[in-house]
Image: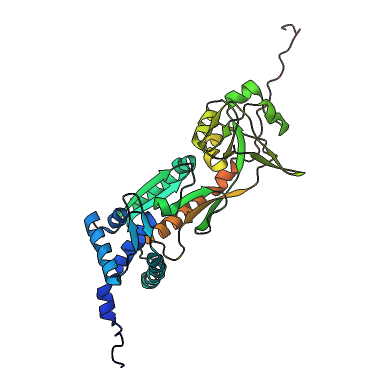
């Protein structure tokens, strides 16, 4: 060996220098944006998490994170190290799965996000059932109609309707979906049923308009192709659950995902309309940050969700199919004498 040449550390020295748990802490801190939150997820107190991160940076001889009272920011060295840590932890995860297939356990904190209506009716109950089956798991469900950044919010999985826009995320389809125009029987008895798209102009349409976005347009599939209208009405909401509540209360017509209103249609609280002019199909998807380094709790929950939605898909979609209208009462006889 040349004099003065650096000596490469052996395996024992490398293991002493950097522990796998410290890598996990670092990756979790980047994902959640909080060192304290990452420590809690791995069972460390905030003080222990801070000491471990300091020890990791000292062992590597570089600063990985710029810390402030509000956020964590990766340094250049931190970004490079984070990428390699993700690959190493993914390999470790795959190695564990290879010898423990079917024995993986959901534990720790599972953070799930979903739109309000879909979350209250489907995702929330599924998350509670999943937690009941995994005693070492805690579940946090965040409901919002705003699009949540999974990385900033520290979300393990989010359920959304529609296409995936963020290329950093992975998407898996849970079920087919479509939107349907619907109204309450009380409203229809006052205003009548729209028979054509043009009839919507004569009705009170409940408008969904999220902050900073244009009002949701209503699109239908016709013989001539797709036909889009921009509804107008005196009631405008930025949350889908309020649109549904107003429709059930008889204040106007709504254009809702069938997953949000199937129960109301089955119970007779809402009536599907213009069913011969269906909206283009879409999908209910679950999205998550990484396909490779996916914690067991998230992987198992995604599989659980897929089974739950698949079990109800046919019945939910059937709620938007055409239904026979009740027959009109016969005209009252006039001028007839009693026998």
Q: From where the camera sits, is residue 301 visible?
A: yes
Residue 246 versus residue 217: which sits nearer the camera?
217
Instruction: Please provide percent x and percent y for residue 265.
Output: 56, 35
Q: Is residue 132 left or right of residue 217?
A: left
Asked whether, in this view, residue 66 is left or right of residue 270, the answer is left
**Would you say 239 lies left or right of 3 here?**
right
Image coords of residue 26 (percent x, y): 33, 62
Looking at the rendered structure, the number of numbered marks drawn on it comes to 0
Residue under the point 29% across and 71% down: 61
User: Residue 289 or 249: which is nearer the viewer?
Assistant: 289
Locate residue 89 relative to residue 48 in the image: left or right: right
Q: Residue furthest bottom?
A: 1
- Image x and y of residue 332, in percent: 71, 14
The N terminus lies in which quarter of the figure?
bottom left
Residue drawn at 49 percent across, 53 percent down: 286
Dividing the picture into quadrants, the one containing residue 338 is top right
Which corner quadrant of the image does residue 194 belong to? top right
In the figure, 302 relative to 227: above or below? below
Tell me if residue 127 comes above or below residue 296 in the rendering.
Answer: above
Residue at 35% across, 51% down: 131
Q: Quadrant of residue 234?
A: top right
Q: Quadrant of the C terminus?
A: top right
In this rendering, does residue 134 appear at all? no
Q: At x 50% / y 36%, what residue is drawn?
A: 239
Q: According to the image, what is the colour scheme of the structure?
A: rainbow
7 or 278, which lies in front?
Answer: 7
Q: Position of residue 222 (x, y in %)?
A: 73, 42
């Amino acid at each position: 060996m040349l004099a003065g040449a650096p000596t490469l550390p052996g395996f024992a020295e490398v293991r002493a220098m950097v522990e796998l748990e410290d890598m996990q802490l670092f990756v979790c801190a980047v994902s959640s944006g909080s060192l304290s939150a990452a420590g809690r997820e791995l069972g460390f107190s905030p003080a222990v998490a801070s000491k471990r991160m300091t020890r990791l940076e000292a062992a590597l001889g570089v600063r990985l994170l710029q810390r402030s009272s509000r956020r964590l920011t990766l340094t250049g060295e931190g970004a490079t190290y984070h990428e390699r840590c993700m690959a190493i932890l993914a390999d470790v995860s795959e190695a564990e799965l290879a010898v423990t297939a079917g024995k993986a356990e959901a534990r720790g904190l599972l953070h799930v996000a979903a739109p309000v209506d879909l979350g209250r009716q489907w995702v929330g109950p599924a998350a509670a059932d999943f937690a009941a089956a995994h005693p070492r798991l805690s579940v946090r469900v965040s409901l919002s109609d705003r699009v949540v950044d999974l990385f900033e919010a520290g979300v393990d999985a989010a359920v959304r309707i529609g296409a995936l826009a963020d290329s950093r995320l992975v998407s898996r389809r849970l079920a087919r979906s479509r939107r349907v125009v619907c109204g309450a029987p009380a409203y229809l008895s006052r205003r009548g049923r729209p028979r054509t798209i043009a009839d919507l102009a004569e009705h009170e349409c409940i408008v969904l308009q999220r902050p900073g976005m244009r009002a949701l347009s209503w699109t239908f599939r016709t013989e001539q192709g797709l036909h889009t209208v921009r509804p107008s009405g005196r009631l405008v909401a930025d949350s889908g659950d309020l649109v549904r509540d107003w429709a059930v209360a008889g204040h106007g017509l709504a254009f809702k995902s069938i997953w949000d209103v199937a129960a109301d249609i089955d119970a007779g609280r809402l009536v599907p309309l213009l069913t011969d002019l269906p909206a283009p199909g879409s999908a209910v998807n679950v999205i998550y940050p990484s396909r490779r380094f996916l914690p067991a709790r998230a992987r198992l929950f995604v599989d659980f969700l897929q089974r739950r939605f698949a079990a109800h898909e046919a019945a939910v979609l059937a709620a938007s199919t055409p239904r026979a209208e009740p027959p009109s009462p016969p005209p009252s006889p006039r001028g007839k004498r009693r026998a």
